[in-house]
C-alpha cells in the first residue's frame, strides 16, 4: 500500500483486516496488527490507521456467555 500512497501523492492510508477465524494464525496476526501498522508508518513517514472487521459467524443471543466476549483484542481506529 505505501507505493499506492506515493503514486497518488497521499499521506494517509488505511489497513483493513477481516477476521474470519477465532484461533491460530488469525489471532496472532490480529494481535500483531497495531505493531506492524506502526512499523510501516515509521518506515514510510505516512499516516496509517487500521480497522478490523469481525466476520466470524455469530452465536445466537441465547447461546452467548461471558467467555464468548473477546474485548482484549485490538479492534479500534488508531492514528499512528
Image (spheres, rainbow, N blue to C red):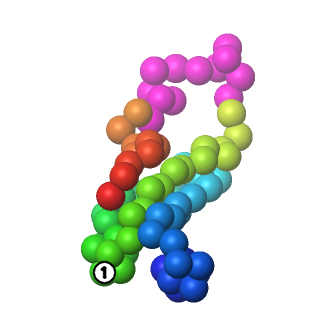
Callout 1: few (<14), some (14-19), or many (20+) C-alpha neighbours within 10 Å?
few
The image position of residue 67, as x and y in percent, is 45, 27
Q: Is 64 situated above or below 32?
A: above
- With 35 as the anchor, is 48 left or right in this view? right
* Residue 65 located within the stretch drawn in magenta: yes
Element on which disc 1 rests: helix
Q: Is 11 situated above or below 67?
A: below
Q: Nearer the viewer, residue 47 or 1?
A: 47
Please give the residue where the numbered disc 1 appears in the rendered image: 43
Q: Nearer the viewer, residue 8 or 33?
A: 8
The image position of residue 24, as x and y in percent, is 48, 61
Q: Residue at x 67, y 14 (%)?
A: 62
The image position of residue 9, as x and y in percent, is 53, 78
Q: Residue at x 67, y 46 (%)?
A: 55
Q: Residue at x 44, y 35 (%)?
A: 70
* Residue 31 located within the stretch drawn in magenta: no
Quarter of the image for the N terminus: give it.
Answer: bottom right
Q: Nearer the viewer, residue 70 or 52?
A: 52
Q: Residue at x 41, y 33 (%)?
A: 71
Segment tinted magenta in the rendering: 59-70
Amino acid at each position: 500500500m505505501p507505493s499506492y500512497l506515493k503514486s497518488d501523492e497521499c499521506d494517509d492510508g488505511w489497513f483493513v483486516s477481516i477476521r474470519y477465524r477465532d484461533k491460530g494464525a488469525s489471532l496472532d496476526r490480529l494481535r500483531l496488527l497495531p505493531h506492524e501498522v506502526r512499523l510501516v508508518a515509521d518506515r514510510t513517514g505516512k499516516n496509517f490507521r487500521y480497522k478490523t472487521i469481525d466476520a466470524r459467524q455469530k452465536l445466537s443471543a441465547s447461546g452467548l456467555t461471558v467467555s464468548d466476549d473477546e474485548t482484549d483484542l485490538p479492534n479500534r481506529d488508531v492514528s499512528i
